[in-house]
Image (tube, rainbow, N blue to C red):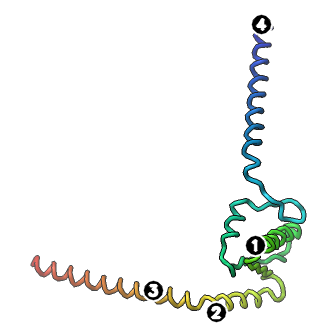
Amino acid sequence: MRAARITNWALTLTGLALAAGIAISAALLLGPRMPRFDVTSTGDLKLAPRTNAVLADAPPGTEVVLATRLSAPGRDPSSVRRVRDILEEIQRRHGGLAVTIIDTGAADGQSRFGGLVARLLTRDAGTVAAARQRFTEAFDATGLAGEAMIRTASALDAARG
């Protein structure tokens, strides 16, 4: 009986040691392949390599905009600081990116947001006009196709008699 207990304990400890060894090996093998860099002043957050890759591929003039009520009652100021830290670091690392932070809860927040929308509308007016034109043409073509289907259905009904 005592030998059976010792055998069970030995098997259990061997299994735990094996599982721990596998976990440590996996961490050592996979961990270094995906380094993350701390981007906050507090050392809490890091950008993933895939995020850095996306940002690095962004064309010059790309803008990252955060427009929210940062000064909302009850909002943790340290959380807001971490978000600002990340956005500032993104701008430092990827110089071609512009970062705009608008606190819509601040006294000038709504007017700054309105200014952003107006600036984007002006900047993208040509793209919006072209998309509107394509939509209008597709909508008109759909209407013409619908009318043709109605005429065809009427002609088939008349032919059936």
Cβ atoms under marks 3 and 1 closer than 8 Å: no
Q: Secondary structure at mark 1?
A: loop
Say which residue label 2 marks. 122
Mark 3 or 4: the one toward you: 3
Label 3 amino acid?
Answer: Arg
Mark 1 vs mark 4, CA separation in Å? 68 Å
Mark 3 vs mark 1, CA separation in Å? 34 Å
Neighbor class of circle 4 (other Cα within 10 Å; few <14, some 14-19, many 20+) is few
Mark found first going from the N terminus, 1 or 4: 4
Q: Is residue 155 left or right of residue 39?
A: left
Q: Residue at x 76, y 62 (%)?
A: 47
Label 1 amino acid?
Answer: His
Q: Is residue 147 left or right of residue 111?
A: left
Mark found first going from the N terminus, 3 or 4: 4
Mark found first going from the N terminus, 1 or 2: 1
Say which residue label 1 marks. 94
Q: Secondary structure at mark 2?
A: helix
Q: Secondary structure at mark 3?
A: helix
Q: Is residue 124 left or right of residue 30?
A: left
